[in-house]
Amino acid sequence: MSRWEELTGGTSGEDYAARFAALAGSGKDMHGEARFCAALVPPGARVLDAGCGTGRVMIRLAELGYDCVGIDLDASMLAVARGQAPELPWLQADLSEFDPAGLGVAANFDLVVAAGNIFPLLAPGTEATVISRLAAALRPGGLMAAGFGLDEAHLPVPPSITLAQYDAYCTAAGLTLVNRFATWDAHPYDGSGYAVSVHRG
């Protein structure tokens, strides 16, 4: 079982969406991740939103002209995503078992984005496998952008993966670090408890 399932029971889609709707209603910017992605690849690029949740990032990218596919294991989150954008492809699958061909998806993405603490919330011991499967979905030269917390202040669960471990898993999967930031607004990484890493396949 993933740490996410342990945390939520797999039934938190509506609550999760409501929390972000409230933040948006208060004037908070909800599109930092999508802007970050748009700075990496041009409109029309194929984007895989790994751990897409309720679709907040992917829906915005689709509005900006990107060819997007979302994948998540949590049916309650996907139900919200499908309700908001039924025309977009939302796939239910475990990232540790992700097989694009088996889901009828071409494995030639220009960008894989993993926002929302995906890696610290995976089932323990599956991190390297997930990174390998996501890397395999990239076209040659494609990018993977992942942002996640590194300490208890930035996570809803105890920290479970360090940047050194993440980089090692990426290297093993054939990915090379391109850049690292402290936020999705591309502030330089300063050793803080949250990092956004960009690797190239």
Image (cartoon, rainbow, N blue to C red):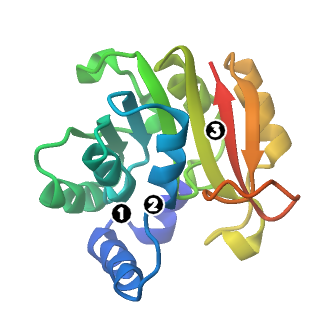
Mark with earlier residue (2, 1): 2
Residue type at mark 2 is Glu
**Numbered label attached to residue 127:** 3
Of callouts 1 and 3, the N-terminal one: 1
**Cα–Cα gap, marks 3 and 2:** 15 Å
Residue 37's spot in the image, x, y percent? Answer: 50, 43
Label 2 – label 1 distance at C-alpha:
5 Å
Q: Name the quadrant of the C terminus.
A: top right
Residue 107 vertical position relative to residue 32 in the rendered view, above or below: above
Secondary structure of the residue carrying tag 2 is helix
Disc 2 to disc 1: CB gap under 8 Å = yes
Label 3 element class: helix
**In this view, which residue lies farthest toward the right?**
191
Q: Amino acid at mark 3?
A: Glu
Q: Between 88 and 118, which is closer to the camera in this rendering?
A: 88
Q: Is residue 33 above or below residue 9?
A: above
Q: Quadrant of residue 109?
A: top left
Secondary structure found at label 1: loop
Disc 1 residue type (three-letter): Gly
Residue 5 circle label: 2
Q: Residue at x 11, y 50 (%)?
A: 86
Give the residue at x 47% y 42%: 38
Q: Is residue 4 above or below residue 163?
A: below
Tell me the number on the disc at residue 10.
1
Between 3 and 72, the residue placed more toward the observer is: 72
Q: Counting residues from the N terminus, which is met first, the one under dot 3 or under dot 2?
A: 2
| Residue 7 x, y percent position in the rendering | 50, 69
